[in-house]
Image (cartoon, rainbow, N blue to C red):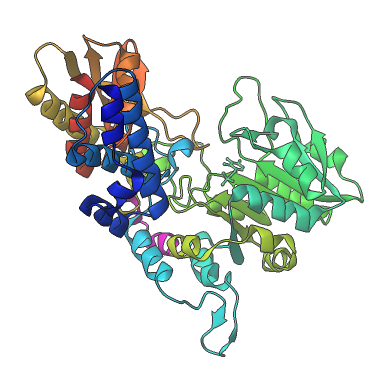
Amino acid sequence: MGKELLKELPSVDEVLKSPFGKKWLAIYPRRYVLAAIRDVIDIYRKLILEGESPSLALEAMASEITIHIERLTSLSLIPLINATGIVVHTNLGRSVLSGRAIENLIKIAGNYSNLEYDIESGRRGKRYSHLKRILRDITGAEDGIAVNNNAAAVLLCLSTLAKGREVIVSRGELVEIGGSFRIPEVMAQSGAVLVEVGTTNKTHLSDYRRAINPNTALILKVHRSNYKISGFTEEVPMEELSTLARTHGIYTMHDLGSGCLIDLRPYGIYGEPTVSDALNAGADIVTFSGDKLLGGPQAGIIVGKKDLIEEIQKNQLLRALRIDKLTLAALEATLMQYADEDKVKDDLPTLRMLLEPPEKIRYRAKRIAYLIKRRIKEQSASVEVIEEYSQAGGGALPEVNLRSYVVAIKPTTLSPDEMEERLRRGSPPVIVRIKDERVLLDARTIRQDEINTLASCILAALS
Ligand SMILES: *Cc1c(COP(=O)(O)O)cnc(C)c1O
C-alpha cells in the first residue's frame, strides 16, 4: 500500500510544469518555488512512510505549497500594532513618520535629486546644505548638520573638537542608553580623554573649574534621558558652564538626547529642555536624535556655532557617519513642519500621541472595547476600559507618567501570558503589556485606522 502511494508522489519537475508551477514562477523567485515544492513532497513522503494515506491530488498539494512559498518569501521587517502606550518605543521603531515626511521620502526615493548638486552653479553641492536654513530657523542656531544617529553625532563632535584632549563630564551624567551607547566608551572611541568631576548626586561649578587645564578642550553636559537623580542633588546649569568655559577659552557641548523642539511645559510636561533653551544657555554645540521626541526618521542632528560646524564637516569620520538621502528627505520635511508651531503638534504622530488629551484616548479605548464585546464569545474574557498611565519612552521624560486609558482584558480560558503570545505572533502582531493578570491595550499609541484590525486580532487570540 505505502510503496504504491510513494510511487504516485509527483516529482518536483511535474509539479513545476503544472499550471500551478507556471503561476508561481510568474510571481515568486524560482529558488523559493523549488524549495517549497521539495518541502511539501518531503512532508507527504514522511506521512506515507508513517502509514498514512494522504490525498495526492495536485490541488491539495498546491495549496500547501503556496503556503510554504508565502512563508519563504515573506519579508522580515514588518509593521505591527503598538498597544504598549510607549510613544517612542526603541524596539518598535521609535517614531512613526508624518504623512508629509512619507510623501517626500517616496518622491526623493523614486527620482534623481540634487542631493549633492548645486542647481544654481551647476557644480557639486553638499548634502548637508539642505538642512541649513530650516535648522537655523527653528532652533536659532548659526548652523547645523545631520548624521546617521545621535550616537554618531556625539562621536563626531568629540572626535573633531577634543581628539587627544580632555573633556570634562559630571559623574552624575555618565549615562548609558540602550546598552550600546555609553558616554565613557563613546569618549574612548573618539580619542578624547574623559575627565570625571563631582559625585553621582552632586557636581558643583568649582568641580568643573578645578578640572580645567591647558589640555582641556570641552565641557560636556549630557541629558539624563532614562533616569532621574532625586533627593540631595545638585547640577550646574549650562548658563554657568558656558560662562566658565568662555573665560577659559574652551567649548561647551550639550548632548540633549531626545531633542525637543517645542516647549512642552504648557502641556504640563517638565524636564525636557528644548534645543533653543540649550543654545540660549550658551552651549556651543548641541546634539540630539531625529527619531525620539522630534518625531522624524533616525538621525543625529548637530547645531551650534558656525565655525565649529565647519570644523566638524571637515572630519573624515563624517563620510562614514553620513545621513542617507531617504532619511534626509524625511527629516527635511519633518523639520519644515516645525515652522508652524501650532500645527506641528497635530501633524507629527509622535507629538500628537504624546500630547493627546486623556478624554480623546478614552474615546478610542471605549470604541475598541465595544467592538470586542459585541463579537466576543460568551464568557471567554472580561473586557473593560480603565484609567492607566503611559510613558513617552525612547530616552525622554523618564519621570513623567502620562494619564491614559487602556482596554483591560482578562481572558478566562487562557492565561494572560498565553494571550500576550498569541497577539504577538498574530498577523499583524500586536504588542501589549500585562498588569495584575490582565492584558492591557493602551489606546494612546493605537491609531483610529488600526482599531478594526486590532479588534479582529483580539478576537482571534481569544477564540
Ligand atoms: C538616545 C540618546 C543617545 C543616542 O541617540 P541615538 O539617536 O539613539 O543614537 C545619546 N545620548 C543621549 C543622552 C540619548 O538620550
- Give the magenta part as a residue range: 333-345
Say which quarter of the image contains residue 449. Answer: top left
Seen in the picture, residue 133 relative to 40 is either above or below; the reply is below
The image position of residue 178, as x and y in percent, is: 58, 34
Q: Nearer the viewer, residue 309 or 114?
A: 114
Q: Residue at x 37, y 70 (%)?
A: 107
Quadrant where the image shows the N terminus: top left
Left or right: residue 213 versus residue 95 is: right
How many discs appear?
0
The image position of residue 451, as x and y in percent, is: 20, 37
Q: Residue at x 66, y 25 (%)?
A: 233
Q: Nearer the viewer, residue 247 or 114?
A: 114
Say which quarter of the image contains residue 55. Answer: top left
Left or right: residue 32 versus residue 139 is: left
Q: Nearer the viewer, residue 318 or 347?
A: 318
The image position of residue 141, as x and y in percent, is: 58, 63
Res. 359 in view? no
The image position of residue 149, as x and y in percent, is: 58, 51
Seen in the picture, residue 178 relative to 461 is either above or below; the reply is below
Q: Is residue 343 magenta?
A: yes
Say which quarter of the image contains residue 80. Answer: top left
Quadrant where the image shows the C terminus: top left
